[in-house]
Amino acid sequence: MNDLENWLSDPATLSRKSASELVFEELRSLILSGRFAAGSKLPSESKLAGKYGVSRPIVREALRSLQILGLTETRTGSGTYVLAAAGDGNISYGDYSARDLMEARPYVEVSATGWAALRRSNDELSRLLGLCDEMEQEENTEAWVRLDSQFHGLIAAASKNAVFRDIVDEVREAMAQQSGLLTVLGPRRQESNDEHRAIVEAILAGSEIEARAAMEVHLKKVEAAVNRILGAERR
């Protein structure tokens, strides 16, 4: 039995509350320590799920976080491979870097939220409130990320500004990847729920100033969380 088989045969016990984060942290540690060397193939999702006693979706979240951090790549039909022992210190979401996204989002979303407070329809307001309710009750990370994406897209649409709407639509996949990463590594879900609720309450009140301020607070906290992860990677 080789070293990898020995490792897989040793069961790991995780807290279900933060299973994705714990799987991610151990796999990252194994990569950074060199136990999973650059170029090596990680065990399959099913084997990792068996190792940790969790579901494959939980393993998938952890593997996706490793890929976003530049530590691994997934090759269709082949598996997940280690790229480097430390990555390059940058986070990318498809065509956009974390820096690109965080520099641009305030210029679009803060203004869009202010206009949404003045222009939203009753139906849009009802849907925003409903999304807040759903996010506060949702425990599945992938489902929560989808709701978060809908939330930001709906605010842009409620601004009644086609430019804001189209820009947010263009980067929604990148935003979703960022949201998923922070949900696993932050963890940011509860804080985001509270921030989302504050944004919608300001939109409900019809206050452009308060709505802009609430979105600005939300994005600053997102940026701080991203910077903490980047800092951890660069140490």
Image (cartoon, rainbow, N blue to C red):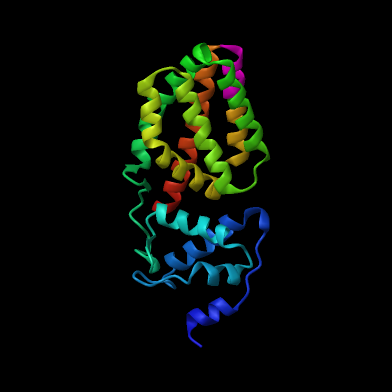
- Residue 221 image offset from top left, x and y in percent: 51, 34
Q: Could you tell me if residue 178 is visible in this image?
A: yes
- Residue 231 image offset from top left, x and y in percent: 43, 47
- Based on the displayed image, in which of its 4 quarters is residue 86 positioned? bottom left
Which residue is located at x 53 percent, y 42 percent?
145
Q: Main secondary structure of the magenta part?
A: helix
Q: Could you tell me if residue 208 is visible in this image?
A: no
| Along the line of sight, the residue nearer the viewer: 80 or 4 | 80
Magenta run includes residue 204: yes
- Residue 3 image offset from top left, x and y in percent: 49, 82
| Along the line of sight, the residue nearer the viewer: 134 or 62 | 134
Which residue is located at x 47 percent, y 72 percent?
43
Q: Is residue 136 above or below residue 204?
A: below
Q: Is residue 97 above or below residue 55?
A: above
- Residue 186 image offset from top left, x and y in percent: 54, 45
Q: Is residue 143 above or below residue 85?
A: above
- Based on the displayed image, in which of its 4 quarters is residue 125 positioned? top right
Which residue is located at x 34 percent, y 43 percent?
97
The quarter of the picture where the C terminus appears is bottom left
Whether residue 224 sits left or right of residue 167 in the image: it is right
> How many labels sit on residues?
0
Boundaries of the magenta span: 198-206
Which residue is located at x 43 percent, y 17 percent?
160
